[in-house]
Amino acid sequence: MKLAFKICIVGDPGVGKTSLILRYIENKFKDNYIPTLGVEFLTKKLKVGKEGIETSLIIWDIGGQHKWQTKLHLYLQGADGAIIIFDLTRRNSFTNLEKWINNIKKISGDVPYLIVGNKKDLVEDRNVKLDEALAFSKNIDNYPVLETSAKTGETVMGMFHKIAENIIIHKAKKQASLSQS
């Protein structure tokens, strides 16, 4: 069985969306910040779960700048899942998570998502604790919370595997409930 999933990566500007994708696709990290203009697409194949289900992730890197928000509905439409990134060193990016989650729910509907705190390597500059992010998630939908570092690569591969697994589980549950009705 071959699958392809549209994964939208969203979050405030400068949280490291593109850096996480670059680390995942090419195992590279760039220190300089270049904002994404609108949206960029990348694809990566992976095998998911114990069964080794062959999956293609079509990754949509969505610019976080305000000027792209008017096109957000076009970018999020048809998403199979999302990864919402915040910067562990910038509290305002954490505060804005609810806005990103609401946009995903409104436009993409009931799709799985991950909440991901990036820049875990910047220990001295940290402004958001894991406990806070877990409490936030529990109050919303209780979706998984991960911490990553695009710079070191920590948890980056696991993040993409986790969203792919969650999408497969979500689609299987949806299919099972449809066949029961």
Image (spheres, rainbow, N blue to C red):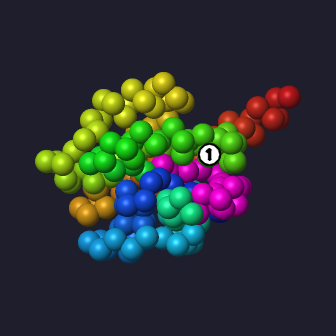
Magenta region includes residue 52? no
Which residue is depicted at the point 26% across and 72% down?
Answer: 31
Q: Is residue 170 visible?
A: yes
| Residue 178 located left or right of residue 56 | right
Residue at image mark 1: 103
Q: Quadrant of the N terminus?
A: bottom right
Find the residue positioned furthest to the right. Answer: 181
Would you say 93 lies left or right of 79 here? left
Residue at position x 52%, y 29% in the image: 140
Q: Is residue 97 above or below residue 4?
A: above
Question: How many other residues sit within 10 Å of disc 1, few (<14), some (14-19) or many (≥20)?
Answer: some
Does 115 sit above or below residue 156? above
What secondary structure is found at the residue carrying circle 1? helix
Q: Could you tell me which quadrant the C terminus lies in?
A: top right
Choose top left, top right, bottom left or bottom right for residue 70. bottom right
Q: Locate residue 162, reporting x and y percent.
A: 47, 48
Q: In the depicted view, which residue is nearer to us: 99 or 173? A: 99
Residue type of the residue flagged with mark 1: Asn
User: Bounds of the magenta span?
Assistant: 68-84
Q: Nearer the viewer, residue 121 or 58?
A: 121
Where does residue 114 sit, x and y in percent of width and height?
48, 44
| Residue 47 seen by the camera | no
Q: Name the residue located 49 percent from the left edge and 59 percent from the top edge.
A: 64
Residue 83 magenta-highlighted:
yes
